[in-house]
Amino acid sequence: MRFDLMIAVVVTCAVAALGLAGTYAVTAERIVEQQRLAEARSLKSVLPDASEFQQVEDAKILQSAEAEAEGVFVSAFRALASDGALIGWGVRVQPRGYGGPMQMVVGLDRNGKVTGASILSMNETPGLGTRIQSDKWFLEQFAGVEASGVDKQLKALDVIAGATKSSRGVNKGVAAAAHVYEKVLSKAGGE
Amino acid sequence: MTRAAFKGGVHPHDSKAATAQRPIEAGPIPSRVVLPMSMHLGAPCEPVVAVGEHVERGQLVGDVDAMVSAPVHSPVSGKVDAITRRLTAGGSIVTAVEVVPDEVQDLASFVLLPEEHDLKATVRAAGLVGLGGAAFPSAVKLSPAKDTPVSTVILNGCECEPYLTCDHRVMVEHAERVVAGGRLIADAVGASRVVIGVESNKPDAIAALRDEANGGVDVLELPTRYPQGAEKQLIWAVLRKEVPKGKLPAATGALVHNVGTAAAVADAVEHRKPLIERVVTVTGAVRRPGNYRVLLGTLISDLVEFAGGLEDDVERVVAGGPMTGAALGRLDVPVQKGTSGVLALRAADCTRAIDDDQPCIRCGRCVEACPMFLQPFALGSYALLGDWNGVERYHGLDCIECGSCGFICPTRRPLVQLIRSGKQALLAKGVKP
Amino acid sequence: MSLVQHFAILLVGAALVNNILLTRFIGLCPFFGVSSSMETSLGMSLAVLFVMTMASAATWVFWNALLAPLGVGEFLYIPAFILVIAALVQFVEMYLRKVSPALYRAMGIYLPLITTNCAVLAAATEAVKPGFFKMNVPYSFGFGEAIVYTIGVAAGFGIALLSFAAIRERLELAPVPRAFKGSPMAFITAGLLSLAYIGLGGLFGL
Amino acid sequence: MDLMLIAKAVGALSVMGVVVGVMLTVASQKFHVEVDPRVEAVFAALPGSNCGACGHPSCFAVAESMVTGASPIDACIAGGQTVVDAVALALGQESCAVDAIVSARHCCGGLAVRRVYEFSGVKSCAASHRLAGGVIECSAGCLGLGDCMRACPFDAIRMDDRSLPVIDLVACTGCGVCVRECPRGHSALLEMVGEAAPVVVRCVQHDKPAQRKKYCPTCCIACKKCEKECPEDAIHVVDWLAVVDYGKCTGCGACVDVCPQDCIDFSGRSAVAPAHTLDGMAANVPGRVAAPKAEQTEEVVAG
Amino acid sequence: MSKWIEVFRSGITFENPLMRLMIGLCSVLAVSTRIEYSFFLGVAVIFVGVMSNVVVSAFRKLIPSEVRIPIFIVVIASFVTIVDLVMHGFLPGVYAVLGIWIPLIVVNCMILGRAEAFAYNNGVWLSIADGLGKGVGFLIVICMLAAIREVFGAGNLVFLGVHVLSLPAWYQPPSLLVLFPGAFLVFGMLMAGANALELRKRDRGKGVSA
Amino acid sequence: MTEATRSRTRVVSAPPHIESGQTCTSIMLWVVAALAPSAIYAVWLLGGITGPAAVVFVTCIAGCLGVEAGWNAVARKPQTLADGSALVTGLLLAMSLPPRTPWWMCVAGAIVAIGLGKLLFGGLGFNLFNPALVGRAAVTISWAGVLAGLPERGWFATLSLPESAGLDAVSGATRLGLFAADRAAAGGYGIDWASHYRPLLFANTQGSVGEVSALLLAIGGLVLIARGIIDWRIPAGYIGSVAVLSWAFGADPIFHVLAGGVLLGAFFMATDYVTSPMSKSGRLVFGVGCGVFNVVARFFGAMPEATTFAILFMNGLSPLIDRAFTPRTFGWVKASD
Ligand SMILES: Cc1cc2nc3c(=O)[nH]c(=O)nc-3n(C[C@H](O)[C@H](O)[C@H](O)COP(=O)(O)O)c2cc1C
Ligand SMILES: Cc1cc2nc3c(=O)[nH]c(=O)nc-3n(C[C@H](O)[C@H](O)[C@H](O)COP(=O)(O)O)c2cc1C
Ligand SMILES: Cc1cc2nc3c(=O)[nH]c(=O)nc-3n(C[C@H](O)[C@H](O)[C@H](O)COP(=O)(O)O)c2cc1C
Ligand SMILES: Cc1cc2nc3c(=O)[nH]c(=O)nc-3n(C[C@H](O)[C@H](O)[C@H](O)CO)c2cc1C
Ligand code: SF4
Ligand code: SF4
Ligand code: SF4
Ligand code: SF4
Ligand code: FES
């Protein structure tokens, strides 16, 4: 058996692992931080009045939210004003569009009115599906939709021609967020 | 009885009306006969006469000691004028013995063949070759291998080529010779059955043969479709057996001879007559179309002249049938043993000028027409590029060059010509069929 | 959804709807490099099927038994997986060389290409690491699923490669403009082929 | 915490390294095969065009054969001196000098020869030759449809405006493919001659001069002027056709000057020849390096 | 130094990995929808290519040839992972798009090919030239491809957030160009263009030598 | 012997020396003739010779002919307009586009169809994908948004349509669109299939130009089969598998055969010689493949109709099919002794 070969491979592996673990240690925090920042920016954009967002960690709430919008619901945030008062909710959802799940944030105020929707990331067809983001009017039309009877209101909204699937995906996300609000969050209250 | 035809093939207009009912007439006695030493497939003959020598009608002028070959006899009495190299209808340049006939010719007599002990030797001595077109020495076919006995002799009276009527006339006028020849062949190879296959467009030939046929000789009416007369297709029509690739027809228990060959066999045996003349259909744009009994070696120009000469608007002269025959660049080439017809075609009767730039539109008609179930379009494309491996992969060597594909192709691709180049290149490379 | 249906959709989705070559742009080097002849394409397809399946099985085991439990997968998976693939390929190469020199002569130059074939790494990673490549697979595959999925990907690779090889055989006969002869035309044909595969997009909601 | 992670990482990847290493070492011993690296080396030295001039089906085949000694190191005809040197180097042998040969065309009729008929069909010499012996009345001359040009694996042939193949002596490697491919092979229309062959007779027809003059304005008329003029006794009219004996020919050009039919030409790479013919032009090229000047080309085409 | 320049230049011209060698295609075709993504991919490839060439050539005497491929590939994979982690941490916007293609740089045939064919046989200094040359060749082509696709398929060109170019409003960009068939088609056309130039040059050369 | 007989320059070519009557041009003209009734009817029904359908026809056909002629002129190649294939392509491109397609889109489609789809490959006979469908696919994908935004609704209402046709001229959604919407609303189909038969057969103004009358298309197709221009196997395989599969999926087979591009595709596009297989069995497989793809896409896909992609997809497979289904050469049997 040629031990020199094995030693060469193992040493390379070990050195590589060492280097990578080091790099990971340096960047890991930043990566988490970046993700949090992006999320925060989105939340801020749909709920501009809030100054702080608090992730909901109550297992019971999360469970019933999950049950309400299976596979679409991701997480929920309390939007707090500078004085700490609850002014609304941010809901992270991942509805399916044309090209797979899209990461979205939907904001609702305490009265159950949608304050806005924003897209974190998506995999839609450039030029077609991506118009849900680039055609500004499309996302804007969700502001003001009421959580109660949301399905009916959404049906009346315009979809982007040629990108029905993507548009419907956004609708689904908003609807899921509204349902979670109506059935779970509105009852959970501000703690 | 009628049999379903083979699969594939085409239906060209048969154009036989002009000569079908014209009895066989004597042909010209030309001022010079040119006897190529290679009028057959196989080894060429060597001249056995010298320049200046006088030869009799029926005298041997060329022979060679090879298995696949056929001796040549002089069809006239006369003086050997020269031994030259001549262009033949097929385009090759071969040694030829040129004889200037005597003033007086006695066409009724000829030098008798030597007495031989069996049919094969007689046929060989007579210089008989297949008169169906391929000119394969007939004697060779009469010695089938031990392991593939022949049980059926098939006489090929299909004459599926348009225009040609020479076999037709032979069958009508010499039915008894044809049947007798068939019997002789069957006896020689030990076959129990003789089947004469005739296309349905020759009812008078069928009737004439049926009158003569009895005991072990059947006349089979076959549908009129080109190339019904091709050997493998004929065997399939008669026996429903495919000749396996690379094998001889005997593998199916069949031996195929042309009806004219059969008649010549009967002549050779009963009259000890060598092959010195044959029936040639001269038709198309000539003034006196007909079926002529032509001395071998007669120049086609003399024959055409004898048939009244060409009309002015003739564009192409073809030796053989229109589907497989050779177009002639010049008419001073001799009639050979395999020359079944001379056609003078006007522009309107023949193919448009061919341009190999014409694309294949992949219509698939050639695939449907090919009686060998090949893909002629692909063979043509590969051959055009000189990709001989492609030709081999698509079984180009199985092509029988019947011309059905070229006939049917809407863009008139020179398919046969291309496939032929491919085949020749492959054979030159030593690829076995 | 019955189990059979589940696996069937997994297979079709991997092979056709998300065809690795023509709708996902992965594994293109051999797609263009090997497709000039039918024989090498067939050989390459089989080699990919073999290596890919083995690779997925191996990476699945390493991931689930070693990397994931230790919590180091996130940053070690690339070297770890590619190491497994490279070793596998070399193994196959040595094996072929010994057992079938003819096959080795025919495929020898393509085997090393498999190491650097994105498709193998992508499929192996996808079959193991949840959410990679944004496939709509919200959960991690079991071993069986990983294998079926990989076979699907490899089958899709084979179908696309073989049909492209047959296409290129015909292209050889075509009088394309001089500047387009060869590779440029291969790319344009691939473009039209992927245009046709667009029609598969979104089939079965995949 | 971080140290723990690093330890785990190193451990994990090392384990995989061991597994892989063991697998490969075992395999490399179990599946060990001996290959002769010299075959690869020789193969690399060959031109790789699989032209077949050496009589082997491929360059790889001849490489194998050279390594076993079954073929000599100069078996590759197309490669010329450079390849022989490279092969010798790869095999660690003494190189040898090669007598390079090139292709020469013995016909200058082209479009001037009388046509017998109009040809319609595949534009290839072979196809035309098979059809009634070719379009031109001369049974030996060039048919001008360029089979040789298409066949040349080294792109050394082009067809000129007389429909005659012009062989670029710089590019021609002497592989002989064109000679094999030309359907006028029976008359040796194309012939392999020594690289230094200085003159070429551009006629191959053995018909009687009186006859061939009728259809070809440029044929050799067997006047024997060249024979008389030649100071080296290197050119003779044999069977009604002038033939050069390259063993004696010095390339003085006396025959070229005297030929009333202009059917003797300069050729050959090393001859000192005026560039007054297309083929002769290549003769001005010293070795395989430089190319003739552009204006020369012009002049030559015009002439 | 002149050798260095020659090695570097060959990567851009007649040994261009994409146009000539046709390797490393996947990420190129996928990412070239926007010039911005292409640029960063190119930079990532240059980094990985140069670094792995450096490491391989520095340790080439120590690497046994039997296991060189696994070792090369682990080296490459490590640099790729570094790019992956760093980009994820510091360029999250770009990473969102390029993320899935970064790991595939590992299998970019080009990099392994260079490690094996060049770095393993040459010194560090020249290996840098080689890695850099091939990488820049890659970068140029991918950016060209992306520029064409972005300008004609989207109607404008945006680089690092700057609006570089916009086509007039009446221009209806055919989105086919930014979809996957467009990648193949445009790349094919680019190659044909390069071929045409080459052929022109060769033809001109031919006119002289008989 | 006269000099004329002895030797005269005449044409020599290889056998065969006679030919069948059909030429490329005559075949193409038959296809045009078979399409003509549908095309003329479409122009008449959709606004007459100044209407939008006429514009589509004119721009597509002129575009295709122009691109081909221009290419030949620039490349100094013999002019090939006379073979008629560019005319067929233009006609079929027009018939596969919606009636209000903007003119510039038609021209772009023609450029892609003839330029990219055909001439780059070497012209007639060498293209691998159906040129008209390449053009259509490129256009519909490139400008999906523009096409979807065509103001169909109001426009058709202004047409004077034959009363007897009994069509609901105002609804904008295509019939397949209705089907697709219905499909989304899970559960059984609520469509009254039979109510669509008459409009689909006689006067259908929703959908592409070529879809106005399934009856005329079918007659044209059958004429081509009867004349031996096209092989029955492709349309039979295509239409047969559409019918059988849609029935198996619980929908109405007649509706699915008549609606959308199936008839036009099956008779006139899948049968394009150049891009379909050559052998008989291969053609059947090809036809069935188109049909299966089409139905599966209709029932499980993201688009309401996929005729274009079904045929293009099978075009891509057709060289492979050709390889797999070559006829057995005569005589290539196991030696039977
Ligand atoms: C290549 C391609 C990409 C597409 N991408 C999207 C997309 O990203 N989002 C979308 O909603 N529809 C997309 N579609 C369109 C869908 O296939 C489908 O036609 C559309 O959802 C129908 O919607 P419409 O009624 O608005 O035309 C795409 C179609 C194609 C051919
Ligand atoms: C395409 C084609 C058509 C043929 N047609 C006939 C024909 O009509 N009559 C005939 O006797 N031989 C025909 N032959 C020749 C036969 O195949 C076979 O060679 C001949 O019948 C054998 O008889 P023979 O040797 O006596 O000529 C044809 C051959 C081919 C290739
Ligand atoms: C030959 C032909 C092929 C067609 N192919 C498709 C296709 O692949 N995809 C498609 O959406 N429409 C295609 N159509 C158009 C459809 O028949 C119909 O017009 C289309 O479904 C319009 O519906 P939509 O606007 O709801 O997409 C084709 C039409 C014809 C005549
Ligand atoms: C039966 C038949 C169907 C055809 N169908 C089409 C078609 O669908 N699209 C097209 O562009 N050309 C069509 N053509 C014309 C022509 O064959 C086509 O343009 C070739 O693909 C060009 O090489 C057709 C021709 C025939 C004879
Ligand atoms: S390929 Fe040969 S056998 Fe087939 S039709 Fe053509 S000529 Fe006849
Ligand atoms: S008949 Fe002619 S056009 Fe038709 S497929 Fe055959 S070769 Fe091609
Ligand atoms: S000209 Fe003839 S001998 Fe010279 S390289 Fe070409 S084919 Fe070979
Ligand atoms: S030399 Fe021979 S092959 Fe070349 S063009 Fe003349 S005839 Fe043809
Ligand atoms: S870059 Fe993907 S296979 Fe080469």
Image (tube, rainbow, N blue to C red):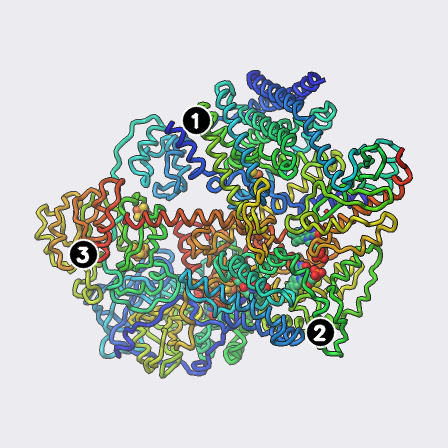
The residue labelled by disc 3 is D263
The residue labelled by disc 2 is F158
For the residues labelled 2 and 3, the Cα–Cα distance comes to 84 Å
Label 1 marks a residue whose chain is: E
Label 2 marks a residue whose chain is: F
**Residue located 51% across and 61% down the image:** F125
The mark closer to the camera, 2 or 3, is 2
Question: Residue F86 appears at what percent x and percent y?
Answer: 52, 66
Type of the residue with mark 1: Leu
Circles 1 and 3: CB atoms closer than 8 Å: no
Compared across the picture, whether D152 is left or right of A78 comes to left
For the residues labelled 1 and 2, the Cα–Cα distance comes to 75 Å
Quick check: B106 above or below B377? below
Q: How many marks?
A: 3
Q: Is residue B364 visible?
A: no
* Neighbourhood count class around disc 2 (C-alpha, 10 Å): few under 14, some 14–19, many 20 upward: few
Tell me if the residue at label 2 has its CB under 8 Å from ligand 3.
no
The residue labelled by disc 1 is E126
Q: Element at badge 2? A: loop
Out of A178 and E191, give the one closest to the viewer. Answer: A178
Which corner quadrant of the image does residue F288 belong to?
bottom right
Compared across the picture, whether D241 is left or right of E136 comes to left
The mark closer to the camera, 1 or 3, is 1
